[in-house]
Image (tube, rainbow, N blue to C red):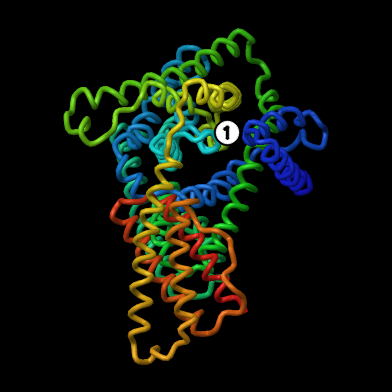
Amino acid sequence: MQGSLLAVLVLSVLLAALARRFNASAPLALVVAGLAVSTIPVFEDIELDPELVLYVLLPPLLWSAGLESSYLNLKRNIRPISLLAVGLPLVTTFAVGFVAFHTVPELTVAAALTLGAIVAPPDAVSATAVGRRLGLPRRVMTLLGGESLLNDATALTAYKVALAAAIGSAATWGKGLGTFALAAGGGVVIGVALGAVIALIRYRLRDPLVESALGLVAPFVIYLTAEEAHGSGVLAVVVAALMLGQLSPHAGYETRLQDQAVWKAVQLLLESFAFLMIGLQLPTVIGELAGISASVIFASSAAVLATVIVVRIVWVYTFAYLPRMLSPRIREREPAPTVAQVFVVAWAGMRGVVSLAAAFAVPMTTLSGAPLPGRPHIVFLTFVVVIGTLLLHGLTLPWLIRRLGVQGDDARTDAIAAAAAQEKAATAAADRLDELLADPETAEVHERAADVLRAWNTRRRNSAWERLGRTEEEIGESPTAAFRRLRLEMLAAERKAFIAERDSGNIDDEVLRSVLHGLDLEEATLNRT
């Protein structure tokens, strides 16, 4: 079994590399490849372990997404994100539960609601990958990213409540709401507490290698702690990651550079493995169908898949325009979305590995020892929804984005904002240099070093408007110690100015990360041995 999983891991990375090489959708390619190779004998017995997904794959993927997300953007869009990440999964749970209960005779109400909670949360990994490649407007990307960060917490909590009722545990509406509130509140509190502790430890270590190692284990510790305390591990990890991401500009440059490289590799590895595993579950799912009539399979599959798609479209369109019609304040504060933008958000509802893991985690029996009603249907219908949405949306979403022209001018806007911020940063660096040269202790610094630094600063200021970024030209070789010390002081002033621009809302977190990356690389060059 271990050898087979290793083979899956290696194959997933190779396939992801090919997809990236040919600019194809890696999640879609991996799922199709998994379906194709699932009949090969060496891969037939590979089953998706729910604990592997929920405790090994999910925490680091959430952590990586949280680190890359913008707390300020999420805060500015908290209303629509909440509707997508909290309201939509709950509505989907009840809608799918109602349809499944009436199309699958074996399902009880609780079992049908369990299925609804399982297929409720979209996995926006593939949607955001497509959107980033095709240049979706930043607000659309923020909505999809924010939804994917938080909707798992809503759906998995609803899943726990419905599953408890399905297996025969005493459950009431009041107890269910209490469980939901405890999970949400506990997850947020634990995330804030552990995030603060980790930030305090990391930024006092001043050891980039240890800081990155601590960052690698942090999501697992946070997730497990929250789950053991009956809180939402998903929310805890997301909250802590957002905190660390917001504070990362204040960390050392070596830690930032190292974290970026490490987490991009980890994200590619885990996402590739997860999507290939989805396709490989075909033999297991087929094995669950013994004794189920073809008519029930076809009718329930079509009904549940259609419900998942239609509910999202209706919900997204309704709450994209209804609040604006009812509230003048919303009309003033939020730009009006176009019909095309709303449709792209509504169509980006691909389900993923979390849904399959939750389905496989449904126990075979109730607490009384009797077989759980409709479990084979739950597993099969989940597989249908996951594969159906991945193929349907994944194949059509890029075409729709191009066809509808849903592409923003964020690159141009970001470039102008970055250049304006560079202007202020260059001024701050020049002022700092003048302060240092006015100091009696640095008055004897070689004038050539100061001239080179001023010229370098001017070039950075001008190139920001020409290229809107830093060139890779080397400014001389083997700079003197004075040159190095003064330039580091100027970099610190630039970094402080950029952070202030981000905090005041003049530039986006994505712009900040981009310009800080340039400063970090420059600082690394100055500090090389």
Name the quadrant containing residue 249: bottom left
Q: Which amino acid type corresponds to the residue marked 1 in the rendered image?
A: Leu
Residue 141 appears in the figure: yes
**Quarter of the rendering occupied by the N terminus:** top right
Residue at the spot 65% in from the left edge and 48% down from the top edge: 269
Q: Nearer the viewer, residue 377 or 91?
A: 91
Residue at the spot 26% in from the left edge and 22% down from the top edge: 322
Q: Find disc 1 in the rendering and name its residue.
A: 356
Q: Is residue 21 left or right of residue 469?
A: right
Q: Position of residue 493 (x, y in %)?
A: 38, 70
Question: Is label 1 in a helix, a strand or a loop?
Answer: helix
**Quarter of the rendering occupied by the C terminus:** bottom right
Residue at the spot 42% in from the left edge and 76% down from the top edge: 489
Q: Position of residue 290 (x, y in %)?
A: 68, 19
Where 258 falls versus 238 (above or below)?
below
Residue 151 appears in the figure: no
